[in-house]
Amino acid sequence: MTQLSSEQVKEKIKNNETFVLDLFATWCGPCKVLMGNLGSLEKSGQELPMGIFSLDIDSDRDFVMELGIRSVPTLKVYKEGKEVFSNVGVMSQSQLLEVINKY
């Protein structure tokens, strides 16, 4: 999973891209679990319909506030640059796959 800067995330949204964004903090235990589940999903060999990226919330507090992030981990799905899904908390690999394939 590729970690992006806030500027790279803004660029993806501006370019109307479809992608998953994992918002995490290095000090957050549940964030590590979600990141592991996302990493395992990427390595599973399954064809995923979109890229999976991460953003450390401590890297740009202002942008994180713009996104409305109050708790981590938060998973967001953007379709054609628009947020279509948001979830706070850990998700299993099967839950992640269901959400990713939905969009």
Image: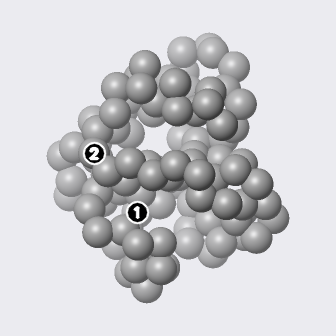
Q: What is the secondary structure assignment of the residue under circle 2?
A: loop
Image coordinates of residue 77 in percent, x first then y, are: 57, 48
Which quadrant is home to the N terminus? Answer: top right
Image coordinates of residue 74 in percent, x first then y, are: 37, 53
Specify the farthest residue to the right.
Answer: 15
Residue type marked 1: Asp
Assess disc 1: are there few (<14), some (14-19) or many (≥20) residues with their C-alpha within 10 Å of its C-alpha.
some
Question: Which residue is rendered at x = 63% and y = 15% of the image?
Answer: 46
Query: Residue 56: which numbered mark, if any?
Result: 1
Specify the farthest residue to the bottom.
Answer: 62
Q: How is the image coloured?
A: one colour
Left or right, 48 with respect to 80, comes to left
Image coordinates of residue 52 in percent, x first then y, are: 58, 42
Q: What is the secondary structure assignment of the residue under circle 1?
A: strand
Query: Disc 2 to disc 1, how far (Cα)?
Result: 15 Å
| Image-quadrant location for residue 14 | bottom right
Left or right, 70 with respect to 43, comes to left
Question: Which residue is rendered at x = 52% and y = 24% of the image?
Answer: 97
Q: Earlier in the sequence, mark 2 or mark 1?
A: 1
Q: Nearer the viewer, residue 21 or 101?
A: 101
Left or right, 54 with respect to 69, comes to right
Query: Residue 89: which numbered mark, if any?
Result: 2
